[in-house]
Amino acid sequence: MPELIEQMYCSQQIVIPPKFPYILKRYCKAAIKTQPYDLLRWSYEYFNALAQHKPPPVKLRLEYPVYTTEGGLTRGCLKVLAQQLSTMEEVPLPVLKAAWRGFCLDNEELQRILCLCEVFQRKETVPFLHFVAVAAGLLTKTLTHTMVLLCETLTKEPDGGSAAIPVEHFLSMYVLLARMDASKDVKYIDGYREGWLYRFAPESAPESVSEIIKSTESPIEDQKLREISASKMGPEETAKKGMVAGRQMSTTSGEFIVQHVEREIMEKVNEQIDILPDPSLKKKKAKPEEVAMVRDILKNFIDDNMDVIVPEEEEVEEEELPIPTIINVYAVPGIGPTVDEHIIKDVEDYAAEVAMVQAELFMPRNIRHFMCPPLEKCIDDVPETPKKEEVPIGGAITD
């Protein structure tokens, strides 16, 4: 009766692993906190991370509103990404793309961030601090707010603390963003900003057009062709033909080569006849039939051995130029225009002075302090609104 034992008669016979309810409960709580755009893809990334003993793509708490950028990046996502990648100073792009894909974020937004970091299609890694700094700029409206967000994202203190980070990390990210111009829309072609002339390597670019022409010419072949053309044509004909003759002799057809080889063979035959001891043989002339027969023999011989006399060059197919990758990077208010160098110098001096008494740390309250110099250029040129004429309510209007 072994067959009856294997059959299912009730739900009590289904074996449930003891840890399954706990795993399912954690999964449900993670999905509620993260609110992924694509639940199926996020579930795959979640369990794949657990299987590889990596931190899963789960936000620390529920955010509202859920999405704050066009690609779906939020402050909660940025903080978790920073925790996942914080162990690497140079993050490989495949690792970054896998972490980005774990939150079901838009790939085009990642490409814009890499373009601003100047690594898209140019390098295989991206500096960790550069990536986090540019990504934080997409979530704020000013450079000052971006630096505050970076302190809150990269700090190792619990929520509600001072959000302090090492001063060298703060200055590294600030100098990068301050010297970056993201005040207007820019088009990137294959990872290079539009209008940059040095995206081509100077070693590969020719110095002049004449060098290109010289590189395509073969001086040995050109000299042989000119000697042969001069021997076949007289000086008067050559002068009349001019460039046309040169163009005609530049071809390497089979007929031209046959005539040239035939002429050389006949010269050698005449040289051998001249040195013959019998004078009657010297004066003897060949009949037209014999000349035609010799020419046919020579022609057949040359046609059969053409590969040896003139090896054929393999035709190289022209490679089609790849279609360039064009990415439109929109203006980022959280980074803004380039900051003047004297402002950057003032901030560096202030941060170094403050960090001396704070264990080489810098925090958002130092940015909000009244002694802190402005992190960005203040816009003073505010257009004045035209004042309306005030008309008195009572009394008479006089000139």
Image (tube, rainbow, N blue to C red):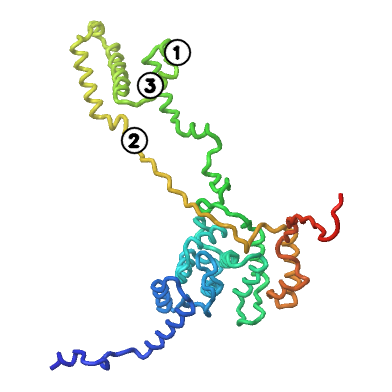
Q: What residue type is labelled 3?
A: Gln
In terms of sequence position, does the residue under pointer 1 or pointer 2 come before the other? 1
Give the CA distance from mark 1 to mark 2. Answer: 32 Å
Place of residue 299 in the rendered image (x, y in percent of width and height, measured from the top left) = 24, 22
In the image: residue 192, left or right of residue 258: right
Q: Is residue 63 above or below residue 282?
A: below
Q: In this view, does 184 lie above or below 84?
A: above
Place of residue 300 in the rendered image (x, y in percent of width and height, measured from the top left) = 21, 24
The label shown at residue 248 is 3
Place of residue 29 in the rendered image (x, y in percent of width and height, measured from the top left) = 46, 83
Secondary structure at badge 2 equals loop
The label shown at residue 239 is 1
Q: State the residue at coordinates (19%, 13%).
A: 290
Q: State the residue at coordinates (29%, 11%).
A: 274
Q: Which amino acid does label 2 sit on?
A: Glu
In the image: residue 12, left or right of residue 125: left
User: In this rendering, which labeled residue sits more in front, label 2 or label 3?
Assistant: 3
